Image (cartoon, rainbow, N blue to C red):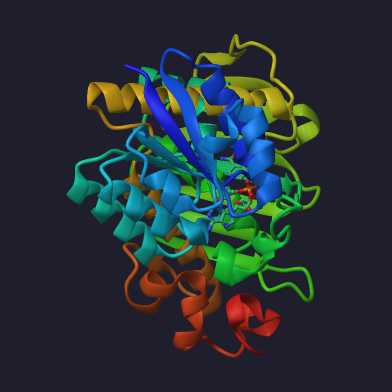
């Protein structure tokens, strides 16, 4: 069965990665329509997808009203996902949304409920799950060679600070009301990769944040994510800090290295070293790819998994409920840093209803870094 795709939002990720991924999977997908209120971006998307002018729309509602669309792919910035996802689900269409599912947990929960009520699939693009070394690490854990997993460390301290598409608002990622947070929100890839390797849902979070002077979102986030008797350290920052993934089990360790100790996906994967009581070895894996082919392949694999999930009735690699929990863990890191204490999931109150900007409703201590730095709308 070929799923007919309507894609909403023709920004960088849509044009550079989603459109080519669908076109690489002609047995599973056919792009039949696009929507974007920016005429410039719509035209770029139309050309990339090879569509006729009558198949593309400045009004999203026109695309959602079409009965020749089976799957709506939402590639707008995250604060704009909810309305589209709810309308698509109400129209009986399956949905895939870019990460993060939303900027605010309440929006994520509303999307999960809308998909459940309509009986449609809601998949979320957690594409780093399909990076070959992440797949290899999970398979190594599943083999039992490392024993019980006790801790995971994901370092992404060398994230490149890329602006959004010029035809829209290139700096929307620095506006907490739109993005919901800074580098950690944008790179919550590190949060879901950590949870995936721990193999248990995140239950509580603590964190330290810092920011570039004058910016309203964090540029550095050092987080501790607790899941039962195991925990992950997820360290994310815009800059030139180190990257890598390390897993500690009761019977051994595995460490993924990237070129010059850089951060995935900017630094190509180098090797995984496994050490147990019987010695050390390097896993036999293909050489790491550069950023564009790596992300392109992972996007193709993510969407192929989603298509197979829809047609076979199984859950996709990341469903709405998982993506909601990952978002809540990210918001919890902001709250933990601001409130200077461990924050339990699921979130409640202002953090659930308004995300990081809900901190303005809470009693954030004067000495808190988030208040001192004026993050998320807090005043010093
Ligand atoms: N999974 C990944 O590896 C990855 C990579 C990049 C971005 N993303 C995610 O994809 C989303 C988009 O990011 P981007 O970098 O492409 O952003 P962008 O700024 O490049 O593009 C945003 C696009 O959305 C359009 N848009 C704005 N309002 C709209 C509306 N109401 N309806 C329809 N379209 C609208 C804009 O015109 C623009 O074309 C974000 O949620 C981001 O986190 C994911």
Relative side of 156 to 354, left or right: right
Q: Quadrant of the N terminus?
A: top left
Is residue 269 shown to the viewer in this render?
no
Who's the residue at 74% across and 72% down the image? Answer: 215
Please provide percent x and percent y for residue 267.
Answer: 75, 32
In front: 80, or 247?
80
Q: Position of residue 231 (x, y in %)?
A: 44, 48
Q: Nearer the viewer, residue 204 or 94?
A: 94
Residue at position x 28%, y 22% from top?
Answer: 311
* 373 on left or right of 117: right
Rendering coords of residue 341 (x, y %): 46, 74
Specify whether 172 is left or right of 95: right
Q: Is residue 247 above or below residue 179?
A: above
The residue located at (40%, 27%) in the rendering is: 4
Quadrant including the C terminus: bottom right
Count of marks placed on residues: 0
Please name the residue shown 76% across and 47% down the image. Answer: 160
Foreground of the two, 266 or 69: 69
Please indicate, yes or no, whether residue 180 appears anywhere in the rendered image.
yes
Q: Quadrant of residue 222?
A: bottom right
* Quarter of the rendering containing residue 242: top right
């Amino acid at each position: 069965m070929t799923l007919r795709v309507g894609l909403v939002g023709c920004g960088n990720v849509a044009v550079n990665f989603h459109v080519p991924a669908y076109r690489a999977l002609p047995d599973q997908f056919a792009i039949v329509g696009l929507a974007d209120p920016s005429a410039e971006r719509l035209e770029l998307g139309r050309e990339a997808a090879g569509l006729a002018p009558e198949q593309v729309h400045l009004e999203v509602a026109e695309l959602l009203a079409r009965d020749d669309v089976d799957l709506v792919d939402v590639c707008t910035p995250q604060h704009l996902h909810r309305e589209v996802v709810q309308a698509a689900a109400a129209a009986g269409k399956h949905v895939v949304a870019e990460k993060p599912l939303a900027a605010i947990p309440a929006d994520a929960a509303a999307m999960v409920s809308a998909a459940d009520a309509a009986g449609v699939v809601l998949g979320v693009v957690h594409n780093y799950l399909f990076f070959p070394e992440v797949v290899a690490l999970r398979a190594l854990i599943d083999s039992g060679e490392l024993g019980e997993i006790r801790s995971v460390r994901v370092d992404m301290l060398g994230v490149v600070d890329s602006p959004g598409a010029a035809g829209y608002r290139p700096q929307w990622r620095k506006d907490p009301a739109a993005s919901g947070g800074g580098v950690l929100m944008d790179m919550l890839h590190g949060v879901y990769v950590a949870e995936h390797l721990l193999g248990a849902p995140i239950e509580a979070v603590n964190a330290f944040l810092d920011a570039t002077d004058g910016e309203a979102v964090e540029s550095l986030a050092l987080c501790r994510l607790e899941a039962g008797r195991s925990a992950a350290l997820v360290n994310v920052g815009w800059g030139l800090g180190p990257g890598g993934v390390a897993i500690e089990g009761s019977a051994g360790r595995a460490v993924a290295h990237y070129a010059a100790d850089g951060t995935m996906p900017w630094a190509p994967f180098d090797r995984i070293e496994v050490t147990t009581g019987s010695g050390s070895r390097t896993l036999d894996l293909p050489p790491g790819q550069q950023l564009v082919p790596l992300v392109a392949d992972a996007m193709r694999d993510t969407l192929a998994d989603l298509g197979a999930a829809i047609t076979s009735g199984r859950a996709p690699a990341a469903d709405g409920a998982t993506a909601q929990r990952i978002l809540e863990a990210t918001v919890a890191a902001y709250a933990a840093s601001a409130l200077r204490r461990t924050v339990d999931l699921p979130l409640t109150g202002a953090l659930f209803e308004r995300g990081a900007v809900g901190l303005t409703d809470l009693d954030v201590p004067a000495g808190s870094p988030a208040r001192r730095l004026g993050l998320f709308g807090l005043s010093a």
